[in-house]
Image (cartoon, rainbow, N blue to C red):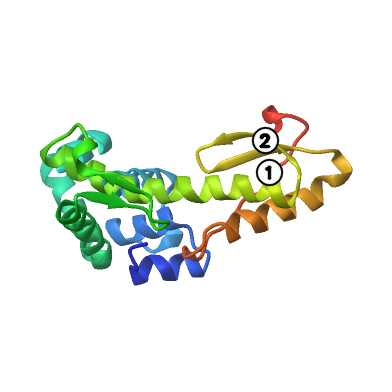
Amino acid sequence: MSGEERLIDAFKNKRDIHTETASWVFDKAPEFVTPELRRAAKMINFGLLYGMSMYGLADRLDVSREEAKEIMNRYFNALPGLQKFLDEIVSDAKKRGFSRTVAGRIRPVREIPAKGVALDRALINSPIQGTAADIARRAMINFESQQGGKLFLQVHDSLVCECSEHEADEVANALSEIMIDSGGEIEHLEVQIKRGKNLSHV
């Protein structure tokens, strides 16, 4: 959504985005990124993407505020397109009076019970998570209408369906294609298929 070239390159080439972030932020080659650094990078990615403050990041990573500020600077210096994108989401929403998903669904600013930084976080969150929700809903509708399989649960961006064992490959392939196609304008989406005799197996 941001058009940030480094992120797009990582997704296109199927590199792990959290490992890449750790490499950029902690100045290590990807092959030297430890599981601990990857976990920290995951917190940084999701936290800063949704407007986490320096204080929140310091608390999450258990570092000083000065170190958290330096991490934030390195993150946004590595991804300048992302900072521009987040700033524009907030300013555009305030000018228009609503935030908007890629599919065009809106959320009026006046309906958000927050002010200041908390409002900015909500305005950033709405179009990003709202777009993900739009894609999941579209995939659910398309799967039911095209495949006729039994879809019985949605968990965030995961869709759980039920079929006989001999249909598993066909249903898995169809679900994967439908979920990717449901992204519309969003490119480079990937789907991970898991299967088992019940949910405890996946």
Q: Secondary structure at mark 2?
A: loop
**Crowd class of label 2 (few under 14; some 14 to 19; many from 20; radius 10 Å):** few
Residue at image location 51% in from the left, 51% down from the top: 135
Image quarter where the C terminus lies is: top right
- Which one is in front, 201 or 70? 201
Kind of residue at disc 2: Val
Q: Which residue is mark 1?
A: 194
- The image quadrant of residue 36 is top left
Residue plotted at (80% across, 38% down): 163
Q: Position of residue 51 (x, y in %)?
A: 23, 45
| Nearest to the observer: residue 48 or residue 90 | 90
Q: Which residue is mark 2?
A: 202
Q: Position of residue 180 (x, y in %)?
A: 59, 58
Give percent across and percent down for residue 21. 35, 57
Mark 1: few, some, or many residues within 10 Å (few <14, many ≥20)?
few
Residue 63 in sight from this viewpoint: no
Amino acid bearing label 1: Lys
Q: Circle 1 — which element?
A: loop
Of residues 187 and 44, the one drawn nearer to the viewer in this rendering: 187
Which mark is first along the chain, 1 or 2? 1
Image coordinates of residue 44 in percent, x first then y, are 30, 47
Q: Cβ–Cβ below 8 Å for labels 2 and 1?
A: yes
Q: Is residue 4 left or right of residue 154?
A: left
Q: In percent of the image, x 68 and y 51: which residue is there?
A: 175
Any part of residue 20 in sight: yes
